[in-house]
Image (tube, grey):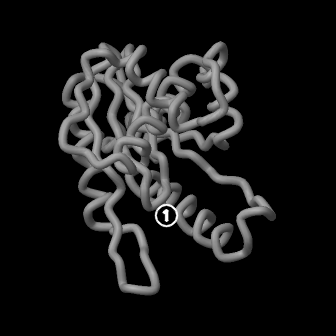
Amino acid sequence: MKNNDTITLPAPVENLLPATTPINTATETAYVPVDGGFTGAIALVMPNDDVYCQPAAFKDLGNYKYLDIDVCREALRAMLARATNAGHRVVAVYEQMPITPLFGAKNNYINGQNNEFWRVLITLEKVPHLAVNPQKWQKHVFKGVRGSNTKAKAEFVRKQRFPRFQPNGFSKSELEGINDALCIALWARESAK
């Protein structure tokens, strides 16, 4: 090396960001809650309480049903795009059913399969996410709500907390999944800080 050559040192690694890493300057969080069963739903709850939702899509093969990856992925992507285009950061939260001996082997297997379906789908979209079991979000969201029917409680909470949301065109079972998804979003917003 000659005396007049200059040496350029690389910048410290901790100060470099890959060129493809967006810098998230969003200050408000939108939630994408998922009630993951066949009668479940996926929703988007914006910071101003605007709600967008879709019942879970599945394929029925007669003696076997499975969640439809193409329809569910498109619903998730559409909700993520709506939130990020509005300048919000997004956190997904899905209901993770625990293994319960009373449900039997077949239902526990299906619940586990559906849990993993949503976990993998959300992970592939690179969305920060949380999992919550039903007892945890119900204990928090249903505090002070009378009765033992969790579906009725979820409907009551949805009507109280999201009065602008008018769920027209959904069947009773679809609406129950939507109600649960919205309650899951409330749990995430209020307690998963």
| Looking at the image, residue 29 lies above or below residue 18 | above
Q: Give the residue at x 36% y 84%.
A: 61
Q: What residue type is labelled 1?
A: Phe
Badge 1 element: helix
Q: Give the residue at x 78% y 62%.
A: 102
Percent of width and height locating residue 178: 38, 40
Q: In this view, does 135 lie to the left or right of 152?
A: right
Percent of width and height locating residue 167: 25, 33
| Quadrant of the image occupied by residue 27 | top left
| Looking at the image, residue 59 lies above or below residue 89 | below
Instruction: Please say whether residue 51 is visible from this viewpoint.
Output: yes
Query: Front-most of 180 and 23?
Result: 180
Q: Is residue 85 left or right of residue 113?
A: left
Query: Front-most of 106 and 155?
Result: 155
Query: Front-most of 119 and 105?
Result: 105
Which residue is under mark 1?
117
Taking the view exactly as shown, the residue that stands out farthest to the right is 101
Percent of width and height locating residue 189: 51, 21
| Quadrant of the image occupied by residue 116 | bottom right
